[in-house]
Amino acid sequence: MEIYQLRAFVTVAKIGHLTRAAEALHVTQPAVTGQIKALEEELGIALFDRRPGRIALTRAGERLLPEAEKVLAAAGSLLGQARELQGEVSGSLVIGTVGDPDSLRLGSLLGGLVSALPLLEIKTRSGDAEALREAVATSTLGASFYIGPNIPRDVNGLPLQTLHYRIAAPFSFSHQVLRAGWREIADMPWIGAPHASHAQSLLRDLFSRQGLLPNIVLESDDASAPHSLVRAGLGLALLREDVAVPAAERDEVVIWPHTRVAAMLSFIYPKTSEHDPAIVAALSVLRGVWGLSAR
C-alpha cells in the first residue's frame, strides 16, 4: 500500500464526500476513487459503504481509520527527522488566519519563523474558522489560528488565549435592550456572518441553547465590519469584549448585560505534523510570543 492511498482513505473518511475530498487533496475524484479501490483490494475488505448521494465508513473502515492515521503520523515524523538531519528546513508553510492580524500577534509569529527558518517559504491565508479547520484536519493546510469553544478533536492544537464576546447593540437601542429578555433580544435585527465563521458559530450556539434563532437582517464577511455596523445603528452583533466595552464607554454601543460568551483562540495543525520541523518551530515561537510555558 502507498501513503497517498492511506491519505485518500483518511481524507474521505473525515470529510464524508468524494468530490470535496478530491478538492482538498488537489486531485480528481476518479483518482481518489481509484486510490481507495486499490487500497480495498490490497486489504481484502470494503472500507466504505457507497450509496447514491452518500459515502460512509463500514465497520471495518471505522476500525482501521485510527491505524491509518497512526501510519500517516509516523510517516510525518520520519519526514520531519529527515529534514532535521539535512540541517536546514526548506519548503513552504501555509498558515490560516481568522480575525484581525494584530489580535493574533501574527507579525511576531512570522518574524520569529523567518528568523528561525530562513529557507522556509511562509504564506498566510485568511478564511472562516470551520473551513480552515477542515483544511488543517485533512492536511491541505499546514496550520491555522482557530476560534471556537475548544480545540477540535480532529486536529492538534496549542491554546493561546481565552476570548470573551458580548452582545452589543446600537446606542439608540439602549431603552429596549436594557429591558429585554432572550426572546426580545433574538427578535431584534442582527448582523450575521458567513455560516462557517467563528462569529456565526458562536452566535448560533448561544441562541440554540435558549431554543431561539437570532433575527439576521444583514450578513457581512468582513471581520472588522460588525463594530462599524452596530455603531451605525443597523443591528446587534457579537463583539469581542475588548472592542465592545470601550465602545460602550464612548456611548457608541450598548451592551446587553445578561451574557458573556467565552471562546478559545488556538493554533491548530494536522495530527500527522506533530514532528514537522516547521510546526515545531512555529509552536516554539508562539509560546514565546504569548508567554506560554513549554509543554
Image (cartoon, helix red, strand yellow):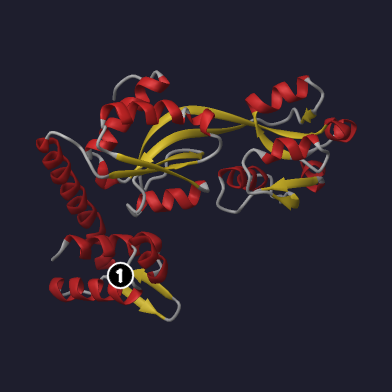
Residue 275 appears in the rendering: no
Q: Which residue is mark 1?
A: 58
What residue appears at the point 79 percent right and 29 percent down from the top-left corner?
253
Q: Is residue 122 above or below residue 71?
A: above
Q: Residue furthest front?
A: 119
**Quadrant location of the N terminus?**
bottom left
Q: Quadrant of residue 232?
A: top right
Q: Quadrant of residue 176?
A: top right
Q: Residue furthest bottom?
A: 52
Q: Amino acid at mark 1?
A: Thr
Residue 137 position, x and y percent, is 36, 51
Q: Is residue 10 above or below residue 292?
A: below
Q: Is residue 293 left or right of residue 236?
A: left
What residue appears at the point 82 percent right and 23 percent down from the top-left corner?
251
Residue 227 position, x and y percent, is 71, 35
Q: How many marks?
A: 1
Label 1 SS: loop
**Quadrant location of the C terminus?**
top left
Q: Quadrant of residue 29?
A: bottom left
Q: Is residue 242 left or right of residue 144?
A: right
What residue appears at the point 42 percent right and 53 percent down from the top-left corner?
134
Residue 282 appears in the rendering: yes
Q: Is residue 80 above or below residue 248?
A: below
